[in-house]
Image: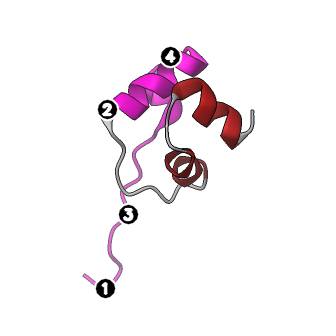
Amino acid sequence: MKIADVARETGLNRNTVTLLYKETATRVDIAAINALCELFDCDVGDLFSYVNEVDPES
């Protein structure tokens, strides 16, 4: 599915979808998570995973 298709189907801003796709988003609204889960008929855990990025300088 193309980014434009996801944006159109969910009503999310294309930039939001692009940031999520490229894994560069720094925050995600609950409404966006809900829209993506509805579109893909999945749970939150299917979309996201927790990665503990420890600062190597600390």
Q: Residue 53 carries which label?
A: 3
Q: What element carries label 3?
A: loop
Residue 41 drawn at (x, y percent): 56, 14
Residue 14 sits inside the magenta stretch: no
Residue 54 drawn at (x, y percent): 33, 68
- Residues under labels 3 and 4: Cα distance? 29 Å
Q: Give the range drawn in magenta.
A: 30-58
Task: State the residue in front, 49 or 1.
Answer: 1
Amino acid carrying label 4: it is Glu
Task: State the residue in front, 6 or 58.
Answer: 6
Q: Which mark is residue 38?
A: 4
- Residues under labels 2 and 3: Cα distance? 23 Å
Q: Which marked residue is nearer to the observer: mark 2 or mark 1? A: 2
> Please, is residue 35 above or below residue 6 in the view?
above
Q: Which marked residue is nearer to the observer: mark 3 or mark 4? A: 4
Residue 33 sits inside the magenta stretch: yes
Residue placed at 41% from the left, 31% from the top? 33
Mark 2 vs 3, N-terminal side: 2
Amino acid carrying label 1: it is Glu
Amino acid carrying label 2: it is Ile
Mark 2 vs 1, N-terminal side: 2
Q: Mark 1 points at which residue?
A: 57
Q: Residue 30 carries which label?
A: 2
Residues packed near mark 3 inside 10 Å, few (<14), some (14 to 19) or many (20 plus):
few
In which image quadrant can residue 7 be found? top right
